Image (cartoon, rainbow, N blue to C red):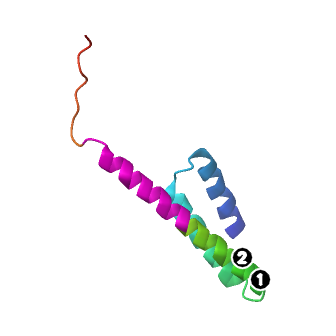
Amino acid sequence: VIQDGLDNLNKALQLRPDYDDAMAYVNLLYREKADRECDMPEQRVADVKAADEWVDKTLEVKKAKATKQQQTPAGITLDQPKK
């Protein structure tokens, strides 16, 4: 089930690379996967590392979106008449 979720989220991220909610869920699924692999320490460490990388990616995208939103004028903008 976890791998199916990761596959579906990766498809979503291929379609929309800035989909920060999908990135956050990838992080959570890797953490869940790590919890279930307590008998395989190397794989568990790799999954936690992957989860941490997804947290970093999510934060980068959210910061970029916030910066872009701050640069966008608020309110209604009217098209300028053509000269």
Q: Residue at 43% across / 53% down in the picture?
A: 64
The residue singled out by tag 1 in the image is 42
Q: CA distance from mark 2 to mark 1?
A: 6 Å
Which x, y percent locates residue 35?
66, 83
| Left or right: residue 52 compared with residue 79 | right
Q: Secondary structure at mark 2?
A: helix
- The residue sitting at the top extreme is 83
Q: Residues within 10 Å of mark 1 (few under 14, many from 20)?
A: few
Q: Who's the residue at 77% across and 89% down the image?
A: 39
Q: Which residues are magenta?
A: 56-73
Magenta: main secondary structure equals helix
Amino acid under label 1?
A: Glu
Quadrant of res 48: bottom right
- Does residue 38 show up magenta in the picture? no
- Identify the residue at image location x=65%, y=56%: 10
Q: Is residue 69 magenta?
A: yes
Kindly identify the amino acid type of the residue bearing the numbered disc 2: Ala
Q: Which mark is residue 66?
A: none
Residue 1 seen anywhere in this rendered image of the structure: no
Q: Quadrant of residue 6?
A: bottom right
> Circle 2 sits on which residue?
46
For numbered disc 1, what is the local secondary structure? helix
Position of residue 55 measured from the top left corner of the image (x, y, whole percent) = 54, 68
Q: Evaluate if marks 2 and 1 touch, with contact meaning CB atoms under 8 Å apart.
A: yes
Q: Position of residue 22 (x, y in %)?
A: 54, 59
Please name the residue shown 75% across and 86% down the image. Answer: 41
* Residue 6 in view here: yes
